[in-house]
Image (cartoon, grey):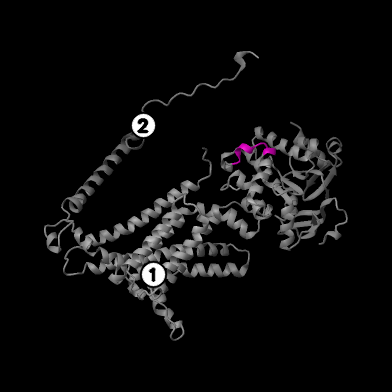
């Protein structure tokens, strides 16, 4: 799809009536979602509700079978060129970090800029160091991921994504695999990123984070978007019974 | 806050005496309990009863100098036979006046392998392709001749350790890249590529090397057009490379399967395409994991080259075998075969040690330093 086909230039992600099946199993049902530049959206819901699958469709780690996904003006379809364009512009942080264990922290950060964007090494390294400073671990740059704690690894993963200068950052349960002591250091980095105006789509159970930075909270269950609201309204006056039940289960203890 | 509220960890103490050092090691490894002690003593007795007579025969009563078989009359190992025939074991039937050409090839090959194996050699980025292209070209030009005014030495005169090394170095250098391509092909999403690779691997792996060599030497010429022929050494080489790359493919595939899906996904999410994902992220990790398997295949390949004996090529074992029937040197079979065994062992042990050093060097797991 060409640039002119995109009606609103400030819309970064447009999902329209998207459906996905795993074999006969209907995992995502009629998902429609619009993300504007600079918006911070938190996606929550019980496990198996399809929230991870949804955000993984946005950079085509999962394929959808019907409906449209337009990212940065480019429609996601079979075309490899489109997929590569979208992946260059969309950063992703995974639950299990997925750092490359055979490369140092600095090499992890420079790999994609050097090979995908063709940035010269010196420039890529300088950029990587500024991002490592932003996630507060410039002193670990020459270590290997296996030598870092979980929280440090996740911050490196965030820096690695930022090195590609993405338009949007997707977070797939970034704190779920961390020890309680390390969750805060990762959330702090994410809050800072949000305050700098990064467009973010986060699947997370950190309701404190949602309250603090989200412009909208989306609640999913059984492959559908059940409810979508501003955080204050969402937490204090949930509209559906399903949302109320979910909130009571995760907030009451 | 009061002083007593500050948490101060207890100081670290040294371990109890007798649990570290030589005494500690011996207690833990050799004399930990009656069963362990008994095993240690039995092993010691076996070593002594085996090694003492061997040492006596090979060294104390061994013959290292003298003119001919007469010098070995008194029993004991006759090493001067090995010395006498050493040139034949190394160069085989290569014309004596042209042996300097083999020496240059062996020296250059050894220097190239040494330079590539040494971790601090500068400019490896250029050295690797230069060696991969240059060494075979130099080998062919020098050993075969016909260029620079060198007389031609037909490949059926290549023999001895020279032939063993030529076959195995070519086999090792070619089988690894072919094996990697086949392994990637076998995991490809494209049906046609996958089917071809599976077919290739299963056919070559399901056939004994001996029959591959027979086919290469007897049957292949039947399928070639009249007048087209290429040397037996080249045919054996192709057979060995095909056979071993099928094995290598399965070793590499084992490594590819051990790489978690998250690595592929992270690479894809960063915008790396298939070849960069494989070349920069997946293969470096997969190959490191299967270094023991790769070197295992290399060692097997090195020893498998002795099978070319059955199509009439003379590797180092065949030259030894040919010499011990010499009536001028009766009863020297043991020394000859021991020498051949030693030659193979030295090369295989070298490869094994190098692979262990490589594994240690590439280990980035949880080592803190």
Find residue B117 and report its horizontal and vertical position in percent.
Answer: 44, 53
Where does the image place residue A71, in percent across and percent down from the top left?
A: 79, 54
Is A243 within the magenta?
Answer: no
**Which residue appears at 53% of the width and 44% of the height?**
B365
Q: Chain of mark 1?
A: B
What crowding class fits label 2: few (fewer than 14 Cα within 10 Å), some (14-19), or many (20 or more)?
A: few
**Is residue A139 shown in magenta?**
yes
- Which circle, 1 or 2, is nearer the viewer? 1
Residue, far top: B2
Residue with the most extreme right position = A7
User: For numbered disc 1, what is the local secondary structure?
Assistant: helix
Instruction: Provide the residue designation for mark 2.
Output: B21
Whether residue A243 is visible: yes
At 29% from the left and 40% from the top, the residue drawn is B40
Instruction: Say whether residue B346 is left or right of residue A189.
Output: left
Q: Residue at x 72, y 52 (%)?
A: A56
Q: Is residue B292 above or below residue A236?
A: below
Report the front residue among A125 and A50: A125
- Give the residues in magenta: A133-141
Q: Residues within 10 Å of mark 1 (few under 14, many from 20)?
A: many
Of residues A197 and B220, the one nearer the viewer is A197
Q: CA distance from mark 1 to mark 2?
A: 56 Å
Query: Closest to the observer: B189 or A38?
Result: A38
The secondary element bearing badge 2 is classed as helix
Q: Quadrant of the C terminus of chain A?
A: top right
From the image, which quarter does the N terminus of chain A lie in?
A: bottom right
Q: Which mark is residue B142?
A: 1
Residue B174 in view:
no
Tag 1–tag 2 contact (CB < 8 Å):
no
Q: Position of residue B284 (x, y in %)?
A: 55, 53
Quadrant housing residue A87: bottom right
The single residue placed furthest to the front in the displayed view is B149
């Amino acid at each position: 799809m060409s640039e002119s086909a995109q009606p609103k230039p400030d819309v970064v992600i447009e999902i329209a009536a998207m459906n996905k099946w795993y074999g006969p199993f209907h995992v995502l049902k009629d998902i429609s979602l619009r993300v504007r530049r600079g918006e911070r959206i938190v996606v929550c819901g019980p496990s198996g509700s399809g929230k991870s699958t949804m955000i993984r469709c946005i950079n085509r780690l999962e394929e959808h079978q019907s409906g449209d996904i337009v990212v940065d003006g480019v429609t996601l379809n079979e075309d490899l060129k489109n997929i590569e364009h979208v992946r260059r512009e969309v950063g992703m942080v995974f639950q299990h970090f997925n750092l490359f264990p055979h490369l140092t922290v600095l090499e992890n950060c420079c790999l994609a800029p050097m090979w995908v964007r063709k940035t010269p090494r010196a420039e890529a390294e300088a950029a990587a160091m500024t991002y490592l400073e932003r996630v507060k671990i410039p002193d670990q740059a020459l270590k290997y991921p296996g030598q870092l704690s979980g929280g440090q690894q996740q911050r490196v993963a965030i820096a690695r994504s930022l090195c590609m200068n993405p338009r949007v950052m997707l977070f797939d349960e970034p704190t779920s695999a961390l020890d309680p002591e390390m969750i805060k250091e990762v959330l702090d980095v994410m809050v800072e990123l949000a305050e700098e105006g990064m467009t973010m789509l986060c699947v997370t159970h950190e309701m404190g984070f949602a309250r603090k930075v989200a412009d909208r909270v989306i609640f999913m269950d059984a492959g559908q978007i059940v409810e979508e609201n501003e955080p204050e309204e969402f937490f204090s006056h949930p509209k559906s019974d399903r949302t109320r039940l979910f909130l009571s289960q995760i907030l009451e203890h | 806050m009061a002083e007593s509220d500050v948490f101060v960890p207890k100081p670290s103490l040294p371990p109890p005496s007798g649990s570290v050092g030589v005494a500690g090691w011996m207690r833990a490894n050799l004399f930990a309990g009656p069963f362990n002690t008994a095993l240690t003593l039995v092993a010691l007795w076996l070593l002594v009863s085996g090694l003492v007579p061997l040492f006596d025969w090979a060294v104390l009563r061994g013959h290292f100098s003298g003119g001919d078989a007469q010098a070995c009359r008194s029993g004991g190992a006759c090493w001067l036979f090995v010395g006498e025939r050493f040139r034949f074991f190394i160069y085989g039937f290569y014309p004596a006046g042209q042996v300097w050409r083999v020496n240059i090839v062996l020296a250059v090959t050894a220097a190239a392998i040494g330079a590539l194996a040494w971790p601090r050699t500068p400019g490896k980025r250029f050295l690797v392709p230069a060696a991969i292209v240059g060494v075979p070209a130099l080998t062919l030009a020098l050993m075969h001749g016909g260029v620079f005014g060198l007389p031609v030495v037909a490949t059926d005169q290549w023999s001895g350790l020279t032939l063993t090394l030529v076959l195995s170095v070519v086999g090792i250098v070619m089988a690894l890249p072919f094996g990697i391509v086949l392994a990637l092909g076998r995991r490809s999403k494209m049906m046609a590529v996958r089917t071809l690779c599976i077919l290739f691997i299963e056919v070559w792996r399901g056939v004994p090397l001996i029959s591959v060599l027979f086919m290469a030497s007897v049957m292949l010429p039947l399928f070639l057009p009249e007048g087209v022929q290429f040397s037996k050494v080249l045919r054996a080489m192709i057979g060995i490379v095909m056979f071993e790359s099928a094995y290598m493919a399965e070793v590499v595939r084992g490594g590819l399967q051990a790489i978690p899906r998250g690595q592929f996904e992270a690479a894809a999410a960063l915008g790396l395409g298939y070849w960069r994902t494989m070349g920069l992220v997946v293969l470096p990790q997969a190959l490191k994991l299967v270094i023991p398997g790769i070197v295992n295949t290399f060692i097997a390949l090195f020893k498998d080259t002795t099978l070319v004996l059955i199509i009439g090529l003379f590797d180092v074992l065949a030259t030894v075998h040919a010499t011990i029937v010499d009536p001028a040197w009766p009863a020297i079979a043991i020394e000859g075969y021991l020498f051949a065994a030693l030659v193979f062992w030295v090369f295989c042990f070298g490869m094994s040690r190098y692979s262990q050093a490589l594994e240690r060097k590439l280990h980035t797991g949880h080592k803190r330093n």
